[in-house]
Image: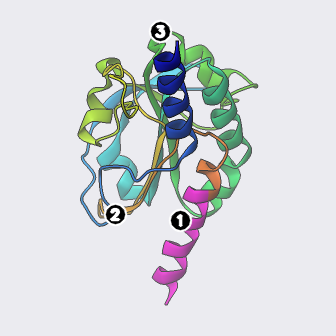
Amino acid sequence: MTRLFAIAALAAVTAATPALADLAVGSKAPDFKAQAFLAGKPFTFDMAAARKKGPVVMYFFPSAYTGGCNLEAHLFSEAADDFKAQGATLIGITAGKVERLAEFSADTATCGGKFPVAADPGAKIAKTYDAPLKVAGIKAPTDLSARTSYVIAPDGTVLLAYDNLKADDHVNQTLTALKAWKAKQRK
């Protein structure tokens, strides 16, 4: 019982502590295409095409219709106009419950049709971004993505990599990094 308690305590501390994502700031973000949904309608998201329009704010989340992921999607939905005002494309990506993403993308309690979500079966995209779910001391499933957010410049450079299982600060972190990058571009 003590060993189980120690593992649970370690997992709780790990989940509450921000960590750096593995794909480092300054590195090149991989391009990809993925099945996505916006307001319930399917389309193919193309990272290279999105970057041609401006910066991309991309966040990985473990699974649709779970507490933290619902909160994070709702927070990004509330800030969608702020990202748009900065000229950014916003997209969420998950390997979990991909069969429910059309519904998730339209649900007013989550994305509300304000930004697309893409399916990542087997966390293949997450792995290219070094963002599969990892929990220290516990062998985590490799078929789910971590809660990791990236801001990617139009040239593909990673401007921000933020990894934190807590959902509540990803919008602030990504919007702050995006605004700082935009301010540098104006100089």
Instruction: Name the residue located 49 percent from the left edge and 33 percent from the top edge.
Output: 10
Instruction: Name the residue located 34 percent from the left edge and 44 percent from the top edge.
Output: 47
Separation (CA) of disc 1 from disc 2 = 13 Å
Instruction: Name the residue located 30 percent from the left edge and 22 percent from the top edge.
Output: 142
Separation (CA) of disc 1 from disc 3 = 31 Å
Circle 3: residue type: Glu
Q: Would you name the residue on which mark 3 appears?
A: 99
Could you tell whether 113 is left or right of 145 in the image?
A: right
Could you tell whether 34 is left or right of 110 in the image?
A: left
Q: Is residue 174 magenta?
A: yes
Q: Which comes before the other along the chain, label 1 or label 2?
A: 2
Q: Would you name the residue on which mark 1 appears?
A: 178
Report the predominant secondary structure element of the magenta stretch.
helix
Rendered location of residue 96, percent (x, y): 45, 17
Rendered location of residue 103, percent (x, y): 61, 14
Rendered location of residue 38, percent (x, y): 56, 28
Q: Would you name the residue on which mark 2 appears?
A: 25
Circle 2: residue type: Val
